[in-house]
């Protein structure tokens, strides 16, 4: 009974401190990175079209590297981001359009993510994303949350850097945390 009461008090303390999941203290600082992705179609296969939130790197989608979203431009020159479910890779990662400005987003929501269809993006589109589920370093399943701001889209195929999207992204690399401000998150 005493062990149960101590465990209950520890759980209540974790919730009172703003950590309802009892996660270990965050220690990875959130930083804003600027990234370029190239369209899945109409660009050399050697260029990265996907992005892995876990590794915080661009990836080539043809090499079997895990990724959380990919970029493409369709025949009507419409730019789109694809979560893994939209590419028939399972409903794992998700994204949602945000009406807020990039710098105004402080906490990622836990629901209403689009898991299985592409999202049209334009310059200044802001999205909130969650990664595919993985096992955190402390042994429980979790996801990473991020916010993304589209900076530039080049739909031309005549330049060597064409069919590209440049974006700013801030990922909370602390598994399970949803804080989307620079620095070590509190949530």
Image (spheres, helix red, strand yellow):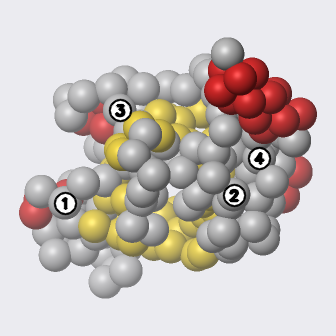
The first of marks 2 and 1 along the sequence is 2
Left or right, 113 with reference to 59:
right
Q: Position of residue 160 (x, y in %)?
A: 31, 83
Q: Is residue 120 above or below residue 126?
A: above
Task: Identify the residue shown where x is 88% and y is 51%.
Answer: 104
The first of marks 3 and 1 along the sequence is 1
Quadrant where the image shows the N terminus:
top right
Q: CA distance from mark 2 to mark 1?
A: 29 Å
Circle 1 residue: 65
Kindly state the secondary structure of the residue where label 2 is placed: loop
Return the mark for residue 34: none
> Callout 3: few (<14), some (14-19), or many (20+) C-alpha neighbours within 10 Å?
some
The first of marks 3 and 2 along the sequence is 2
Kindly state the secondary structure of the residue where label 4 is placed: loop
Task: Identify the residue shown where x is 78% and y is 71%.
Answer: 183
Q: Position of residue 93 (x, y in %)?
A: 41, 37
Q: CA distance from mark 3 to mark 4?
A: 22 Å
Circle 3 residue: 92
Circle 4 residue: 187
Q: Position of residue 58 (x, y in %)?
A: 36, 69
Q: CA distance from mark 3 to mark 2?
A: 25 Å
The first of marks 1 and 4 along the sequence is 1
Depth check, front residue: 26 or 133? 26
- Is residue 130 visible to us here? yes
Depth check, front residue: 6 or 122? 6
Between circles 2 and 1, the one closer to the viewer is 2
Circle 2 residue: 25
- Is residue 83 visible to us here? no
Task: Identify the residue shown where x is 43% and y is 40%.
Answer: 140
């Amino acid at each position: 009974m005493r062990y149960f009461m101590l465990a209950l008090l520890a759980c209540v303390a974790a919730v009172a401190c703003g950590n309802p999941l009892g996660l270990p203290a965050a220690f990875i600082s959130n930083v804003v990175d600027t990234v370029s992705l190239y369209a899945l179609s109409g660009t050399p296969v050697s260029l990265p079209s996907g992005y892995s939130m876990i590794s915080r790197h661009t990836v080539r989608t043809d090499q079997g590297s895990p990724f959380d979203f990919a970029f493409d431009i369709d025949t009507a020159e419409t730019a789109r981001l694809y979560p893994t479910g939209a590419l028939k890779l399972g409903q794992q990662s998700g994204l949602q359009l945000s009406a807020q400005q990039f710098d105004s987003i402080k906490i990622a929501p836990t629901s209403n993510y689009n898991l299985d269809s592409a999202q049209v993006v334009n310059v200044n589109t802001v999205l909130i994303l969650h990664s595919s589920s993985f096992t955190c370093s402390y042994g429980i399943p979790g996801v990473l949350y991020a916010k993304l701001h589209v900076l530039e889209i080049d739909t031309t195929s005549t330049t060597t850097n064409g069919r590209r999207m440049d974006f700013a992204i801030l990922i909370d690399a602390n598994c399970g945390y949803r804080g989307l401000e620079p620095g070590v998150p509190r949530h």
